[in-house]
Amino acid sequence: MKKICLTVTCPSKRGIVSAISTYLAENGCNILDSSQFDDMETGKFFMRVSFFVEEGASFETLRDGFAETAAPFDMDFAFHDESQKMKVIIMVSRFGHCLNDLLYRVKIGALPIEIVAVISNHMDYQKVVVNADIPFYHIKVTKENKPEAEAAIMNVVEDTGAELIVLARYMQILSDEMCQKMSGRIINIHHSFLPSFKGANPYKQAYERGVKLIGATSHYVTADLDEGPIIEQDIVRITHAQSASDYVSLGRDVESQVLARAIHAHAHHRSFLNGNKTVVFPASPGSFSSERMG
């Protein structure tokens, strides 16, 4: 049986859930998992439904036929074949912990993505990437060549058919134009501290202030640096006994985990943009299972 995911965003209105479930039932579909959220402040409704097709209706028939149901509710909807892995480009500079973590998760089937390319402004991870049978692109970025570099990056996106860009500690600021063009399709990861530390060596600054919590935030990229809609966050506790190098190591661990969770949510179509925020639904049963353990 084919497993399909339906995502819906529309103005809040009575009867939406009934209309969706009736359409699926009448077309021989059995709902496996369903999540919904009605934002009372914005008047927007969000829904994700995962279901099996039990009576032979094709993906195209279900998708095209749903337009009549969607029209009265002004739905923005999409059907997703859950057997198809999302095509992803990873961008990295000289910190490789997130890249290596993602390569391993993809290898064991823990993330439903296909890494179609890795782009870097340095050569540090070329061998690691090529050994994983993934195309590696070295695109150097300077103040002088930034427009040309971003054009080269977008060429890779178009050539590979990538649906998502992941900034796995890519230490370059993207232009407003690229952020707008790829809105909702670029995910970033960065550290989080209270109080906040900016500039060079934030972990050293945090150590010197005796910070007790190191966090990480993964978010969609916008023109406002590190201020896009948040997808996932987590923290790790620190004690007075940890050294400055401990801070860095623990920070790397939490960054890797948070980024992987954010990608998991996006690739499973659980994350919805809601203005400056996101709606992130819980994972469907079985979606965290791996094909193999190692």
Image (cartoon, helix red, strand yellow):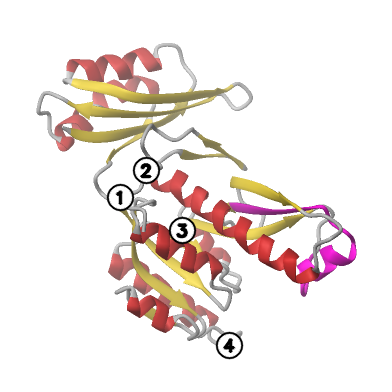
- Residue 276 visible here: yes
Three-letter code for the amino acid on which mark 2 is drawn: Ser
Give the spatial CA distance, label 2 vs label 3.
Answer: 30 Å
**Mark 2 surroundings within 10 Å by alpha-carbon count, few (fewer than 14), some (14 through 19), many (20 or more):** few
Question: Horizontal and vertical percent for residue 80?
Answer: 29, 40
**Mark 3 surroundings within 10 Å by alpha-carbon count, few (fewer than 14), some (14 through 19), many (20 or more):** some
Secondary structure found at label 4:
loop
Pick the residue in front: 44 or 93.
93
200 shown above or below 86? below
Camera-near label (3 vs 1) is 1
Specify the quadrant of the image occupied by residue 115.
Answer: bottom left
131 shown above or below 243? below
Camera-near label (2 vs 4) is 2
**Mark 4 surroundings within 10 Å by alpha-carbon count, few (fewer than 14), some (14 through 19), many (20 or more):** few
Pick the residue in front: 7 or 253.
253
Numbered badge on residue 291: 1
Side of 267 where 260 appears, left or right? right
Three-letter code for the amino acid on which mark 1 is drawn: Glu
